[in-house]
Image: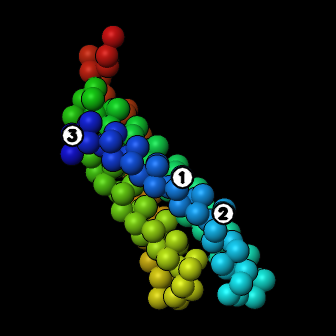
Amino acid sequence: MNPKSWIIFGAFSAAVAVALGAIGAHGLEGWLEKNFEPSIATARMENWQTAAQYHRFHALGIMVVGFLLQRDRSRILNASGWLMVLGTILFSGLLYVYSVTGSKWMGPIFPLGGLSYIVAWVLLAIGALRQTEGSLPR
């Protein structure tokens, strides 16, 4: 993707993350409390909040990829962006679903999302380190 697309995608992802966080804070909590035992409702609410927190954080990371790509096109930086997207789907996205459904089949997939996030940040660091002084805006 081009730099502008990464920035737009990251900004949209951040907006979705804030909206889902608000849904969790203002609507989901009551629904969970009505439909589940208190300990289950609390755990699922915490899961939702974790999903939203990671989602917001990585939406910003996606925008950073776009800003760095404006300086210098890089396959490593693009890979970082795609891994942040994958992590958002596999970790945050499935954690949102799990918070509402409690479906246990997702459990083994969460670590793949977390690993995607970790590798994305490592690639972001490598991509930034490889940028030369001449590629930086003045």
Q: Nearer the viewer, residue 89 or 31?
A: 31
Task: Look at the numbered disc 2 and give the secondary structure of its residue.
Answer: helix
Viewer-nearest of discs 3 and 1 = 1
Q: Nearer the viewer, residue 103 or 120?
A: 103
Q: Which residue is label 3 attached to?
A: 2
What amino acid type is highlighted by mark number 2?
His
Instruction: Give percent across and percent down for residue 83.
Output: 35, 57
Instruction: Give percent across and percent down for residue 120.
Output: 40, 52
Of pointers 2 and 1, the one earlier in the residue sequence: 1
Q: Please determine whether, in this image, residue 44 is positioned above or below residue 71.
A: below
Task: In the displayed orientation, state which residue is furthest to the right.
Answer: 38
Q: Which residue is label 1 attached to?
A: 18
Q: Would residue 74 appear left or right of 92 to someone viewing this image?
A: left
Which quadrant: the N terminus?
A: top left
Task: Look at the numbered disc 3 and give the secondary structure of its residue.
Answer: loop
Q: Would residue 16 appear left or right of 75 to someone viewing this image?
A: right
